[in-house]
């Protein structure tokens, strides 16, 4: 039954998912050949700053929009399938609340994982053109010295962290939606409030832990010990990852309990 639930969720989400991400990759390919391949990085800096800043802003906006679309797709699927009118049918299946939660967590993680991979592919398409790589070789030694490692290695580590953080995003979203359904009169509003409160509490605790380990403010730490930027960044990532996993486990346990004991359908 678990396998069937996962397959059903993925089949339901993949139609929109594929459309959004195919459009994203198509935009990246067009931007690569129509813009990035034609940028002359040997021009004076004052002539490059404005167009590159605009292009970077558009890229960031596009990435945020694609990632947000995937997140909303996952969240709406979870709410609609379990806590709306459709939930009456879902809860008649021979599957318990915890089984539904596990299936949704796996399918949601798969979607977020694929989303991260496609975004990474789009970035590779944009920034692996010959003029970009040739220009980067001129500053590669300085960048390696600042980071303490090559940019490619740094990008791989960052990508792995993003993949790991996907599970936290999925579980936190389901946790907040499940808490919201405890208030039948204001489900959506309470779910949104739960999200912001949870996010604020986690970030506040994270800042306290980082300060306790000497990573806040970080740049003073770097200047004092003369360590590369990667040491500071990955130190922060290690702490945030530990906090993220701890919060994820707690949220999953609470969500598991609510779905087992306190389900309210419309």
Image: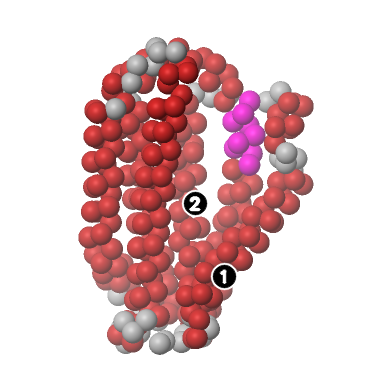
Q: Quadrant of the C terminus?
A: bottom left
Protein image colouring: secondary structure
* Neighbours of disc 2 within 10 Å: few (<14), some (14-19), many (20+): some
- The disc label shown at residue 194, or none: 1
User: Where on the picture, by quarter, is residue 138?
Assistant: top left
* Neighbours of disc 1 within 10 Å: few (<14), some (14-19), many (20+): many
Q: Quadrant of the N terminus?
A: bottom left
Instruction: Give the left or right position of residue 87, taking residue 29 as reference.
Output: right
Would you place residue 51 above or below residue 68 in this image? above
Q: Viewer-nearest of labels 2 and 1?
A: 1
Magenta highlight range: 228-236
Instruction: Give the left or right position of residue 5, taking residue 209 as reference.
Output: left
Would you place residue 162 above or below residue 141 in this image? below
User: Where on the picture, by quarter, is residue 233?
Assistant: top right
Residue found 45% across the figure and 61% down from its top: 170
SS category of the residue bearing label 1: helix
SS category of the residue bearing label 2: helix
Main secondary structure along the magenta-highlighted residues: helix
Residue found 65% across the figure and 61% down from its top: 201
Question: Could you tell me residue 84's position as x and y percent?
Answer: 37, 81
- Residue 106, can we see it? no
Would you place residue 139 above or below residue 91 in this image? above
Q: Counting residues from the N terminus, which is met first, the one under dot 2 or under dot 1?
A: 2
The residue indicated by pointer 2 is 165
Residue found 67% across the figure and 52% down from its top: 206
Question: Could you tell me residue 194's position as x and y percent?
Answer: 57, 70
Instruction: Give the left or right position of residue 242, taking residue 104 as reference.
Output: right
- Residue 194, can we see it? yes
- The disc label shown at residue 114, or none: none
Magenta stretch holds residue 253: no
Q: CA distance from mark 2 to mark 1?
A: 19 Å
| Front in this rendered view, residue 92 or 123 | 123
């Amino acid at each position: 039954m678990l396998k069937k639930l996962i397959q059903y969720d993925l089949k339901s989400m993949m139609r929109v998912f594929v459309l959004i991400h195919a459009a994203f990759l198509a935009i990246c390919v067009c931007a690569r050949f129509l813009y990035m391949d034609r940028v002359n990085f040997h021009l004076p800096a004052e002539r490059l700053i404005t167009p590159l800043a605009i292009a970077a802003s558009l890229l960031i906006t596009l990435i945020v929009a694609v990632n947000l679309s995937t997140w909303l797709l996952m969240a709406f699927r979870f709410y609609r399938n379990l806590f709306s009118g459709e939930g009456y049918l879902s809860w008649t299946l021979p599957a318990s609340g915890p089984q539904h939660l596990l299936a949704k967590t796996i399918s949601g993680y798969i979607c977020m994982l694929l989303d991260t991979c496609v975004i990474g592919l789009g970035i590779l398409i944009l920034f692996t053109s010959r003029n970009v790589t040739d220009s980067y070789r001129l500053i590669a030694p300085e960048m390696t010295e600042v980071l303490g490692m090559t940019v490619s290695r740094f990008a791989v580590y960052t990508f792995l962290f993003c993949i790991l953080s996907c599970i936290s995003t999925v579980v936190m979203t389901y946790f907040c939606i499940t808490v919201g359904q405890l208030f039948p009169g204001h489900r959506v509003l309470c779910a949104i409030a739960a999200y912001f409160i949870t996010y604020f509490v986690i970030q506040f605790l994270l800042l306290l832990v980082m300060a306790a380990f000497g990573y806040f403010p970080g740049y003073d730490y770097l200047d004092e010990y003369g360590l590369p930027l990667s040491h500071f960044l990955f130190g922060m990532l290690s702490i945030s990852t530990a906090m993220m996993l701890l919060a994820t486990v707690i949220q999953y346990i609470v969500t598991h309990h609510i779905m087992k004991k306190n389900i309210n359908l419309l």
